[in-house]
Image (cartoon, rainbow, N blue to C red):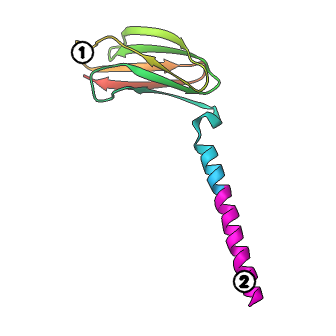
Amino acid sequence: MKKNNLIAISVISMFLVCAFFLAYVGTKNLDPANSNSWWTVYFQDPKSPNMSFDIENHSASTNFHWEVDTDNNSTLLQGTENIKNNQTKNITIPDVSNKTGKISVVVTTDKDRQEIYKNF
């Protein structure tokens, strides 16, 4: 009987140690500030005609160049933003509802390029 209790206690304690370890590792890996190797661009309201967007930075890059382009490759607006690590910058775009077709927002850093767009 003592041997069975010892086995049961060992199995339960190993399960608890593994569960706590996996919870710690999972929480650590889900923290966006932990990896410091990515950035993203997204519209504040993807369903409205508003073209305002955010750049969220979790990387070593700090200089971001953005352009608002039409589908015939003409640039409507452009700018450069300095965004520190673990910060988000809101970029407000004036009304472009008089334009038709695909309107793209292209954001580039030294190494990467991301593009989002809306069709009007």
Residue located 37% across and 14% down the image: 69
Q: Which percent across, then down, holds residue 63?
A: 58, 15
Magenta stretch in the rendered image: 1-21
Q: Quadrant of residue 109?
A: top right
Label 2, secondary structure: give it.
Answer: helix
Residue 99 image point, x, y percent = 25, 13
Q: Please identify the quarter of the rendering in which residue 29 is found.
A: top right
Q: Residues within 10 Å of mark 2 (few under 14, many from 20)?
A: few
Name the residue type under label 1.
Answer: Ser
| Residue 31, position as x, y percentages in the image | 59, 40
Question: What residue is shown with label 2?
Answer: 5
Q: Quadrant of the C terminus?
A: top left
Callout 1 environment at 10 Å: few (<14), some (14 to 19), or many (20+)? few
Residue 62 horizontal side relative to residue 6, left or right = left
Three-letter amino acid code at the position of disc 2: Asn
Query: Residue drawn at (36%, 13%), measured in percent from left and top?
Result: 93
Residue at the image position 43 percent from the left and 13 percent from the top:
67
Q: Quadrant of the N terminus?
A: bottom right
Question: Mark 2, mark 1: which one is toward the viewer?
Answer: 2
Nearest the eye: 6 or 54: 6
Residue 80 placement, left or right of 11? left
Where 37 falls versus 2 (above or below)? Answer: above
User: As drawn, is 63 to the left or to the right of 102?
Assistant: right
Q: Is residue 45 above or below residue 16?
A: above
Identify the mark nearer the N-term, 2 or 1.
Answer: 2
User: Which residue is at 47% across, 9% downward?
Assistant: 79
Q: Nearer the viewer, residue 53 or 12?
A: 12
- The secondary element bearing badge 1 is classed as loop
Which residue sits furthest bottom? 1
Residue at the spot of label 1: 97
